[in-house]
Image (cartoon, grey):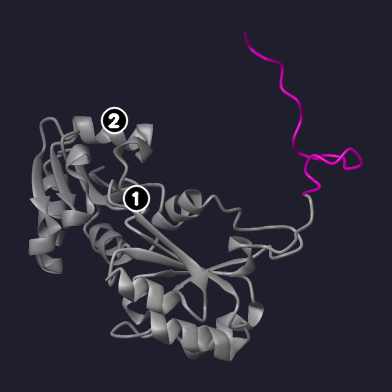
């Protein structure tokens, strides 16, 4: 059966690509990649592939490249930044391929919010603070359901992560406060997480917009809101507590 691989290449640092993704790129015949979001070092892994920059293509042209090459039995990769499943628009591609009898295989990648939390040294789910992460985007050209308005999601006071929204940061702050976050709630913005020009800006809801605008950051950044960024206190995990028994994790003998 003909197939297309949808591969996540990670957030930017070429060392954060998965082994599986790297092996596929090295063997690929055709690669359609997501423009400037894909580092040159990763494109260089495509040793023999004919590459197509999706930034200059419309949906129908991408479909045609994927379908025609897959039908010829070529190893074809649709290369996405981060992870294909998060704001990657893969469903419309996989559905179109399925209609034409072509299988889709998704290879996950490290997504930028994880690279951002790593840059900040965070634990996003912190006992005594929150056990929930909400990943969303601010509304502009792409609408969101009424139940997913920022002010509604903010009522949970969990860790909130925003993609594709830093240019709307002032709106995010306004709606987060409206939903229940205190003005002093910690906030952070990570620009181009894991890239050489990465920038980290931290503050609170009351001042984060001013700080980010001062750095002229309007795109390619992750916004994180929540007390996990700068917790006043938290509880120790029960994972390694001497009084806690484990139902799933067992000690494994060293194979050496």
- Residue 216 is situated, as x and y percent measured from the top left of the image, at 27, 71
Q: Residue tagged by mark 2?
A: 23
The verdict on residue 240 being magenta is yes
Q: Residue tagged by mark 1?
A: 11
Most extreme residue toward the top is 256
In the image, residue 151 above or below residue 221: below
Q: Which of 63 and 140 is in front in this view?
A: 140
Q: Residue at x 57, y 81 (%)?
A: 153
Q: Which residue is drawn at 49% across and 90% down?
A: 146
Q: Which of 51 and 240 is in front in this view?
A: 240
Q: Quadrant of the N terminus?
A: top left
Other residues around mark 2 within 10 Å, as few (<14) / some (14–19) / many (≥20): few
- Residue 176 is situated, as x and y percent measured from the top left of the image, at 53, 83
- Residue 42 is situated, as x and y percent measured from the top left of the image, at 22, 39
In the image, residue 155 above or below residue 121: below
Q: In the displayed structure, does residue 247 sit left or right of residue 32?
A: right
Report if residue 144 is visible in the image: no
Q: In terms of sequence position, does the residue under pointer 2 or pointer 1 come before the other? A: 1
- Asked if the residue under mark 1 is in contact with the one under mark 2, i.e. CB atoms within 8 Å, the reply is no
The verdict on residue 74 being magenta is no
- Residue 160 is situated, as x and y percent measured from the top left of the image, at 54, 70
Other residues around mark 1 within 10 Å, as few (<14) / some (14–19) / many (≥20): many
In the image, residue 70 above or below residue 128: above
Report if residue 114 is visible in the image: yes
Which contiguous range is marked in magenta?
237-256
Most extreme residue toward the right is 243
The prevailing secondary structure element of the residues shown in magenta is loop
């Amino acid at each position: 059966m003909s197939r297309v691989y949808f591969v996540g290449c990670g957030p930017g640092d070429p060392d954060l690509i998965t082994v599986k993704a790297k092996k596929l790129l090295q063997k690929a015949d055709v690669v359609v990649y997501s423009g400037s979001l894909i580092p040159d070092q990763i494109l260089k892994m495509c040793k023999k592939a004919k590459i197509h920059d999706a930034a200059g293509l419309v949906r129908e042209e991408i479909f045609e490249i994927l379908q025609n090459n897959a039908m010829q039995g070529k190893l074809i990769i649709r290369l996405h930044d981060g992870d294909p499943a998060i704001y990657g628009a893969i469903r419309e591609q996989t559905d179109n391929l399925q209609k034409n009898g072509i299988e889709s295989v998704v290879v996950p990648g490290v997504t930028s919010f994880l690279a951002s939390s790593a840059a900040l040294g965070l634990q996003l789910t912190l006992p005594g603070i929150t056990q929930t992460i909400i990943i969303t985007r601010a509304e502009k050209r792409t609408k969101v359901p009424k139940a997913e308005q920022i002010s509604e999601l903010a009522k949970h006071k969990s860790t909130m992560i925003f993609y594709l929204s830093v240019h709307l940061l002032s709106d995010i702050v306004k709606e987060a406060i409206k939903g229940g976050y205190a003005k002093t709630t910690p906030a952070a913005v990570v620009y181009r997480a894991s890239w050489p020009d990465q920038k980290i800006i931290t503050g609170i809801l009351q001042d984060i917009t001013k700080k980010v605008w001062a750095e002229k950051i309007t795109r390619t950044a992750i916004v994180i809101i929540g007390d996990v960024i700068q917790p006043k206190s938290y509880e120790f995990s029960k994972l390694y507590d001497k009084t806690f028994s484990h139902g799933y994790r067992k000690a494994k003998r060293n194979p050496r």
